[in-house]
Image (cartoon, rainbow, N blue to C red):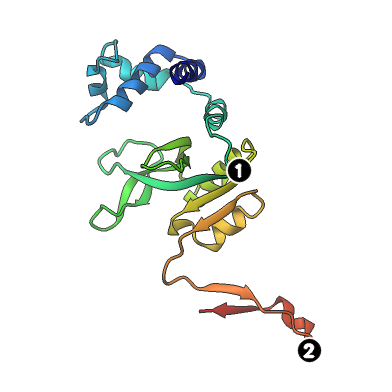
Amino acid sequence: MECERLKQFRQETYQMLGKAKDATFELMDSVMTTRNVSCLGEFSLSPLFRRKWSSTYEALQDTRPNRNKLMRRYVEEIPPLKYVLLGIDHTAWGRRGAKTLKDRTYEHQASSNNSVTVGQGYSTIAWLSEKQGSWALPLRQERITSYETPISKAAWQLKQVTQHIQQLVLVVLDSEYGNGSWVNQTGEISASKLMRIRSNCCLWSRRARSLASCADAGSLVKTE
């Protein structure tokens, strides 16, 4: 049963890869089964990749996967649950030496000496399984362009995903999203959000309505 389900999933995924399906599909298998490589061409050494090394580059250049169809197909793999647990994260890919790479941005990188690097940022939204382990199913993973922000990209991804999930949704995020901008941009999205807040973050709330003065109802107070 599980074997047939896997075959069906692979076949349906294959049909959504656009051009260069064969090379792209074999490259995906090679990436998932290879521990370490020093360059893209090394993926062609995998026994699962039956083409020449140049096909690894040509596959990425020619393929145009249908991201929306792939996302909907991945969502179908989420079992019936009371709450669907999603996670969103922003990952930096440092490319200091790639001066000709288009649309590089300044990215925060904890592993960097000065915590800032030049490269590209990627936003990932994934379903987090309740089973033990660190396994997760990415639903969308996309580059954050120079005219976007990690928060605007994540908000857009969350909106796209929740449109195709019938169950209640809980999304967890780190402190990068624990701010008013994220709350404002996702206020109308049907999902519960659990964000980590920085220790120096100041929270504000509306003052309780006073019978003595209705004018105070809309004022704000700072809560420590």
The amino acid beneath tag 2 is Ala
Evaluate whether residue 20 shows in this view: no
Identify residue for label 2: 212
Give the structural element (helix, strand or loop) at label 2: loop
- Residue 213 lies, with reference to residue 29, above or below; the image says below
In the image, 126 versus 217, the foreground residue is 126
- In which quarter of the view is residue 43 placed? top left
- Residue 186 lies, with reference to residue 43, above or below; the image says below
The amino acid beneath tag 1 is Lys
In the image, 183 versus 126, the foreground residue is 126
Give the structural element (helix, strand or loop) at label 1: helix
Q: Residues within 10 Å of mark 1 (few under 14, many from 20)?
A: some
| Residue at x 55%, y 26% (from the top left corner) | 73
190 on left or right of 146? right
- In which quarter of the view is residue 38 placed? top left
- Percent across and percent down for residue 49 are 29, 15
C-alpha distance separating marks 1 and 2: 42 Å
| Residue at x 26%, y 11% (from the top left corner) | 52
